Amino acid sequence: MNDRIEVRSSEFALSQEELVSFHRDGYVGPFDLYSADEMEANLQALRPKLLNTKRAIYSQERSISGVTNLANYDRHLDVDFLASHITRAEIADRVSSILGRDVLCWRSEFFPKYPGDEGTDWHQADNFSNVAGSKHPQIVWPEDADFGGTITVWSAFTDATIENGCLQFIPGTHRTMNYDESKVMEYHEEAINNVEKQGVRRGFFGYDYRQLQKDPNWSPDESKARSMVMRQGQFIIFWSTLMHASHPHSGLTEKMRLGFAARYLPTSVRVYPYSNTLEEFGGSARLDKFGCVLVSGQDNFGHNRFVDRTFNGYPFQVR
């Protein structure tokens, strides 16, 4: 398979002004990718493919009630539209502006929010060990790196409004971790949709993210929060270490909010270096079919497996 992606013209690279804004605030965007009509047509064609999980790379072996279905993780590895989406020049050029030329995508997830759903807790993610049952970091940066986390590109597959649960960011919070990812969160199914935090219904898939706080008396300054309203077909880029959350779905509309998050790293970062399984929120699945996708440049390190998604076909090619 190819271990190199041709260097693009960087037509969509971030401007110097955008880079300054990103490094200051921890996010940049939103940017246009599809028209609303185009995204809606793509979504209608995508729905039956998402329901068919036969080709999904994860067969969930263990789970507890209410956890995220791991079969719907990393669907860019079996759905051609999503494979094309994560490698779009509009996304890859901008991410490469931040991370450097050699970039991989290691994770994608859907984030639906249905009428009446609670908002998502304020949280940060550095090495993603807090959600892993094994407590091992899912990503490990080189020892000389002065920063961690991952770049998340969150795409609005439907309109994202305050009423239906759009994202919220607290600008400038991406360089200080307020949470200890080595701590353990306890699952409580009865807490879903039943807990108010600072007057807002917020949760974390049956967990309470406050249990990871380094200072139990600290709370995020929501007066500085900004709501990321996005139209269908746009995307926004942010560090996973940025304080982020989402509004509850008010239920004033019957339409769900659907976001698709793809996560990017330099090829120097090790992905799942300590585990042969994906452990998330009580679920477990083997990683034998998993591979990163090279979206820009080349891999000069050789410590990650890659899947070739530069062609339309099946089965996967992993090296």
Image (cartoon, rainbow, N blue to C red):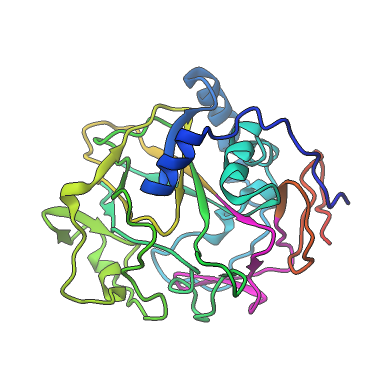
Does the segment drawn in magenta span residue 38? no
Quarter occupied by residue 165: top left
**What percent of the width, then of the height, locates residue 46?**
59, 34
Quarter occupied by residue 273: bottom right
**Residue 157 seen in the figure:** no
Q: Is residue 14 above or below residue 35?
A: below
Q: Nearer the viewer, residue 105 or 62?
A: 105
Q: Which residues are magenta?
A: 263-292
**What percent of the width, then of the height, locates residue 200?**
16, 52
Q: Is residue 313 above or below residue 244?
A: above
**Residue 28 seen in the figure:** yes
Position of the C terminus, as image quadrant, is bottom right
Quarter occupied by residue 196: bottom left
Does the segment drawn in magenta span residue 270? yes
Q: Nearer the viewer, residue 178 or 114?
A: 178
**What percent of the width, then of the height, locates residue 310?**
79, 41
Q: Nearer the viewer, residue 105 or 285?
A: 105
**Which residue is rendered at x = 56% and y = 70% of the image?**
138
Q: Nearer the viewer, residue 53 or 300?
A: 300
How many numbered badges does the structure rendering display? Answer: 0
Q: Is residue 319 above or below residue 88?
A: below
**Which residue is rendered at x = 31% and y = 48% of the image?**
171
**What percent of the width, then of the height, locates residue 179?**
33, 71
**Which residue is rendered at x = 65% and y = 27% of the image?**
11
Q: Residue furthest right?
A: 1
**Which residue is rendered at x = 40% and y = 40% of the image?**
21
